[in-house]
Image (cartoon, rainbow, N blue to C red):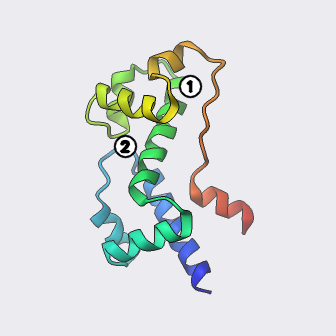
Amino acid sequence: MAHDIHITVVCALSKWIENHLGRVIHLEELASYSGYSLWHMQKLFKESTGISLGKYIRERRLAGAVYQLSASDTPIFDIAMDFGFGSQSHFTYMFRKRFNITPHEFRQNPDITLDIAPPLHLIHQKTA
């Protein structure tokens, strides 16, 4: 029963994060939304998913950026800003760290497929 409640909370957090990727997300704000303390929310999320909430948010920002890079001609700088990265260089650093390729190289080579997981709430929606 507690597992079901935890999955429900994780899915609600996942949906909220997806709807707010274009701005800085403060974990305290998420904790308030969840109804749990910051510590308990982070513990619950990590125990339920195996990854930290901060890492999940970074992954979702990068996933959104990958989609924008492949589906639009929006400048890389604008994509970096749209997904809450402080600068294009920080975005490029995080992108390369995660995918071993720069955003520019990815955009120039449409045959490259990157490993992107769907949002957690969509994964659990399919299994429910």
Camera-nearest residue between 44 and 67: 44
Quarter of the N terminus within the rendering: bottom right
Q: Residue at x 56, y 80 (%)?
A: 5
Q: What residue is drawn where x is 42% and y is 72%? A: 43
In primary-sequence order, the first of circles 1 and 2 is: 2
Q: Amino acid at mark 1?
A: Ala
Answer whether labels 1 and 2 touch (C-beta < 8 Å). Answer: no
126 shown above or below 81: below
Q: Count the marks: how many?
A: 2
Image spot of residue 16 (x, y percent):
45, 59
Q: Measured from the top left, where is residue 80 in percent x and y?
A: 35, 31
Q: Position of residue 76 (x, y in %)?
A: 39, 22
In-image side of 58 versus 127 (left or right): left
**Amino acid type, mark 2:** Gly
At x 38%, y 77%, the residue is: 40
C-alpha distance separating marks 1 and 2: 17 Å
Q: Mark 2 packing: few (<14 Cα in 10 Å), some, or many (20+)?
A: some
SS of the residue at dot 2? Answer: loop
Quarter of the figure with the C terminus: bottom right
- The residue lying furthest to the bottom in this view is 1
Write the residue at 37% across / 70% down: 33
7 or 97, which lies in front? 97
Q: Is residue 12 above or below residue 25?
A: below
- In this view, which residue lies farthest toward the top? 108
The residue wearing badge 2 is 22
Q: Is residue 119 above or below residue 36?
A: above
| Residue pointed to by mark 1 | 71
